[in-house]
Image (cartoon, grey):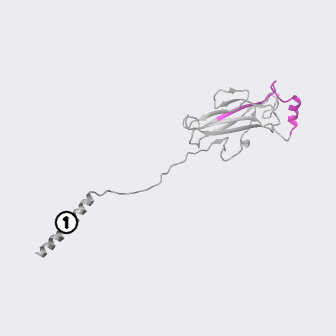
Amino acid sequence: MLNNWKLRFILACISLLFCVFIINSTFAKYVTSIDGDVNTNIARWRILVNDTDVHTNASLSHAIAPIFYGNDFIAPNVIAPTSEGYFDLVIDSTSTDLSFSYSIDIAVSENSSVRDLVAFAYQVNDGPIINADFLSNIGGNVIRNLSENVNTVRIFIKWDDSENKTMTNHEQTDASYDTTRNPKLTVNLSFIQLNNV
């Protein structure tokens, strides 16, 4: 009888272990873990003005070339009282993934030999020519995928010889002999990312 009891005890233990195993696997939770990195690209911010990267260059002086029309009395591409011309600022946003606003401020340089050099009008692309007494804060928005990738802002300039001029005739003549200074305008461009338009 003792052997029978041992056999029953062993079978009961095996049955109990079998039940625990079955119950444990029935209520077991599947647990798995995995990790990874989220890879994304940063938006490009590379604006060129007259083929010059504004981020890596502090000056555009070498990239701005004024054109003066000339007439029967004044040779082309030189400046004299009443001369008129223009210069272009070509804003290339092809390598930019963001919409942005631009602002252009123009003033006579403190080192200019001609104080009466003025910017009197501007034109964006083939739009209308906008006249102004003094150009400051020319601006606009370049909207990604809605605007042109290359925008040309043409600034019209002249040597003002009207009654509004500040230089006397004698000073105008002396400016032509000044070899230490040139007629200069200071052009300041600013670009700011647009979040909402």
Place of residue 81 in the rendered image (x, y in percent of width and height, measured from the top left):
82, 29
Task: Residue lying at the far top in this picture: please name it.
Answer: 163
Task: Residue lying at the far bottom in this picture: please name it.
Answer: 2
Q: Helix, strand or loop at disc 1?
A: helix
Q: Residues within 10 Å of mark 1 (few under 14, many from 20)?
A: few
Quadrant of residue 5 within the rendered picture: bottom left
The residue that appears at 12% across and 73% down in the rendered structure is 4
In the image: residue 194, left or right of residue 1: right
- Number of on-image labels: 1
Place of residue 133 in the rendered image (x, y in percent of width and height, measured from the top left):
73, 26
In depth, the one of 122 and 66 nearer the eye is 122
The residue that appears at 27% across and 57% down in the rendered structure is 27
In depth, the one of 191 and 63 nearer the eye is 191
Quadrant of residue 28 within the rendered picture: bottom left
Q: Compared with residue 121, is residue 22 higher up or lower down, i.e. above or below?
A: below
Screen quadrant of the C terminus: top right
In depth, the one of 80 and 146 nearer the eye is 146
Please state which amino acid type lies under the numbered disc 1. Answer: Ser
In the image: residue 149, left or right of residue 184: left
- Magenta residues span 152-178
In depth, the one of 172 and 194 nearer the eye is 194
